[in-house]
Amino acid sequence: MSTATLRDRVAAFADDPVTVRGALHRIGITAFVSTLLVVTLFPLYWTINTSFKPADETVTAIPTFFPENFTIEGYVNVLLTSGAIDNVINSIVVSVGATAIAILIGVPAGYAYARNPGKIGGKNVAFWILSLRMFPPIAPILPLFFIFRQLGLIDTYVAMVLLYLTFNIPLVVWLMRSFFQDVPEAVEEAALMDGYSRFQAFYKVTLPLVTPGIVATTLLVWVFSWNEFQFALVFTRTAARTFPPLIPTLVGGHETLWNQVAALSTIAMLPVIAISLLMQRRLIRGLTLGAVKG
Amino acid sequence: MSSDTKTSRLGRVTKNDHLEYWFALPAILILLALVIVPMLWSLYVSFTNLNLTVSGRAVEIIWFENYANLLTDRRFWDSVLKTAYYVGVGVTVQFIIGFAVALIMANYTDGWLNSLLFTVLLLPMMMAPIVAGLMWRLVFDESFGPLNHLLGAVGLPEPSWLSSAELALDAILIADIWQWTPFMILILYTGRLAINEDLYEAAKMDGASKLFTFRHVTVPQMKGVIAVALLLRSMDAFKFFDKMYVMTQGGPGTASELATYYNYILGFNEFAMGKATAMSWLLLLFAVVLANLFLLILERGEGGDRVV
């Protein structure tokens, strides 16, 4: 295209307020979206960047925005040399165990509170269960530490699973209550008319209908268990220590191996990122305790 | 859609079965054993002089001495005031940014772009707070961190974020705002999408200005969602512990020590169980007030429209 036509175009563009506004509009949106993305993603990018550097490159006075000597030694060293693989395995055992039991116990309770709360203490007990989710963890930690020490349960899987049930069960009961309430009772009544027992109606008719809700609840509860720090800090030493309380101990000391800490953090993020990508909007309801249905 | 009509309808068909008892019993028993009984015991301990470092001493009931000691303890009040600052400023900033971004997303960006933003925004809030703290510990580092390097490169001062008493708490606050503003954005965005577009059409027909529409359509329609977002964030911010632990450990000195951390120190560094449990009960009372406000709003919204 010739320069003349380009100049004409620019002139026409500037004369037309609608197009100018459109262009400004587009520039504004581009600026808005890029700022949001950069601010949100920069710390993640920086951690991943650090995790692929050799140890000495993580503490250079002029930080490198890409690993100059790309290496996976951070990952190998933290998992094998520092033995963090044991902590990751502990995290998997505890989080999966606590999630499975919470779902097994919490789903039926959620159903009961959705259908006939009057029979089992009513709304007040349902609210009481939810309010346990909102305790500052230090409140139950103090007495439970004393009790578990007497029972010799410190630094065991059993202790960790039991502890995580204290906040997982309330969450499961409350969320599943909300999902069960979405299933019309007429569906179950029809099954009862057909001669199903109440348990059969629950198990064969209603439960399949809330499967998406159970999946969302399970994943959310698992993420909370996987991420949990304060209980793990107090109740584990070595044998049952999960990865979160390991992170600050790696940062302490006079010489921190930042590539290793960053590598462990990256490993810890991977399943959470996968779940976020998978679930998207469906997580909103769980994250707001059922208050906002995304 | 009240629960009473539910009971009678299913009740008519089912009469005397005990399904609900068997379904709810395990959950209630476990919570009684693991939370309620220990908490009652903790209430008892808060009236005693139990200290795990002093062995052999008979545990005596000293009634309100632990509570009195706390209320005259400078470090207690410092930590409580810092918590109030932290929750108040943190949640306010998260809300203002979150609301603005949510409305821009709802009004100016479309389809695939919003899906992308939605996905990216989920990442900070889903990751472990301890990992988020570690990330910001790296970003803020004063000798090799990227933030001060960039600030220096454009000629701005390079503050000592985590080692100065003035900035440590704000640095943690920034990390927390980073992690939780997306929560506000996504909830408020979801709430904004739930508003019936006819209301905006009607406002437009009447020639209402954007500000007028915002004040008289958007805000009133989103009241419930806004309250839920503010309360959930406040309750969570109040429990805050992890990031502080990995970023500053309450330091330097006690400059960034929040209430939950001081409570932890009392229990597990000083082993003053009586005083620690007393403090945890004071924190709990405050949490219960917030939780009840949340439940009140939840209950009022129940059975109404799908926003809340």
Image: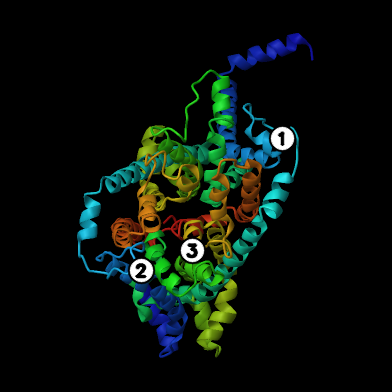
Task: Bin the neighbour count of mark 3 within 10 Å (Cα to Cα): few under 14, some 14-19, many 20 and up.
Answer: many
| Label 1: which secondary element | loop
The chain letter under disc 1 is: A
Task: Bin the neighbour count of mark 1 within 10 Å (Cα to Cα): few under 14, some 14-19, many 20 and up.
Answer: some
- Can residue A55 be seen here? The reply is yes
Residues marked 3 and 1, same chain:
yes
Q: Residue at x 58, y 66 (%)?
A: A94
Give the percent coordinates (x, y) of residue B224. Answer: 37, 52
The type of residue carrying mark 3 is: Phe
The chain letter under disc 3 is: A
- Residue furthest right in the image: A1
Mark 1 highlights which residue?
Answer: A67
Q: Nearer the viewer, residue A142 or B183?
A: A142
Give the percent coordinates (x, y) of residue A232. Answer: 51, 60
Apparent side of residue B263 relative to residue A49 in the rendered image (left or right): left
Pair 1/2: label in front? 1
Pair 3/1: label in front? 3
Apparent side of residue A158 relative to residue B293 in the rendered image (left or right): right
- Can residue A191 be seen here? The reply is no
Q: Are discs 3 and 1 less than 8 Å apart at CB?
A: no
Per the model, the C-alpha gap separating discs 1 and 2 is: 51 Å
Mark 3 highlights which residue?
Answer: A235
Mark 2 highlights which residue?
Answer: A128
Q: Residue at x 39, y 65 (%)?
A: A140
Give the percent coordinates (x, y) of residue A136. Answer: 39, 58
Apparent side of residue B88 relative to residue B133 in the rendered image (left or right): left
Task: Bin the neighbour count of mark 2 within 10 Å (Cα to Cα): few under 14, some 14-19, many 20 and up.
Answer: some
